[in-house]
Amino acid sequence: MTHRITICTSCRHKGTECRPGYDLIERLRQAIAKAGDAVPETFEISGVACMAGCDHPCTVAYHGTKKATYLFGDIDPETDIDDLVSFAKQYAYLSDGWCSSVDRPGKLRKSTLARVPAAIMAIEEDKVWAS
């Protein structure tokens, strides 16, 4: 199974040129490596130019094959690393990626911007949908 953590690199703190995404990528890579076997799956950690979470820098997404995707905002590279690593541990064990907000660690309970279900192909024959 493939797991990814994607971090926005263009998010800025309001009124500044500070872009915390690059710092967050480096800190999270180090923390996941330090956690060793406590994080049971490999997580690819990378940056992306924009995730449209500009009002909530820094934004972080967790993706997994056939799993729900999570987008978190207002993540601080200096104070939220432990919560991000704890969620990586948790997310690795979730077969469909689905969990309640009360089950997420620390700040991630309240900083969820979106939970997107895994892509499911549904084909229905002979149905007409009215708007």
Image: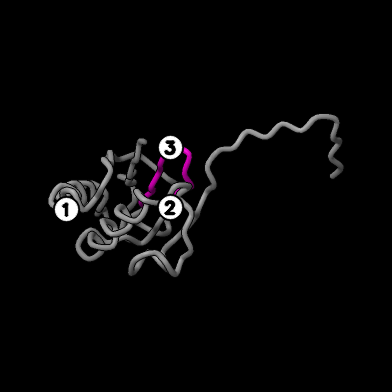
Q: Tell me, what colour scheme is on the image?
A: one colour
- Tell me which segment is drawn in magenta: 60-69
Res. 45 visible in picture: no
Residue contact at pointers 1 and 3, CB within 8 angstroms: no
Q: Nearer the viewer, residue 36 or 17?
A: 36
Q: Residue at x 22, y 66 (%)?
A: 79
Q: Residue at x 15, y 49 (%)?
A: 36
Q: Residue at x 28, y 43 (%)?
A: 41
Q: Position of residue 87 (x, y in %)?
A: 33, 57
Q: Which residue is mark 3?
A: 65
Does 65 lie within the magenta span? yes
Q: Is residue 27 left or right of residue 46?
A: left
> Main structural element of the magenta stretch: helix, strand or loop?
strand
Q: Which residue is mark 1?
A: 35
Q: Which residue is mark 2?
A: 71
Q: Position of residue 25 (x, y in %)?
A: 23, 47
Q: Nearer the viewer, residue 59 or 101?
A: 101
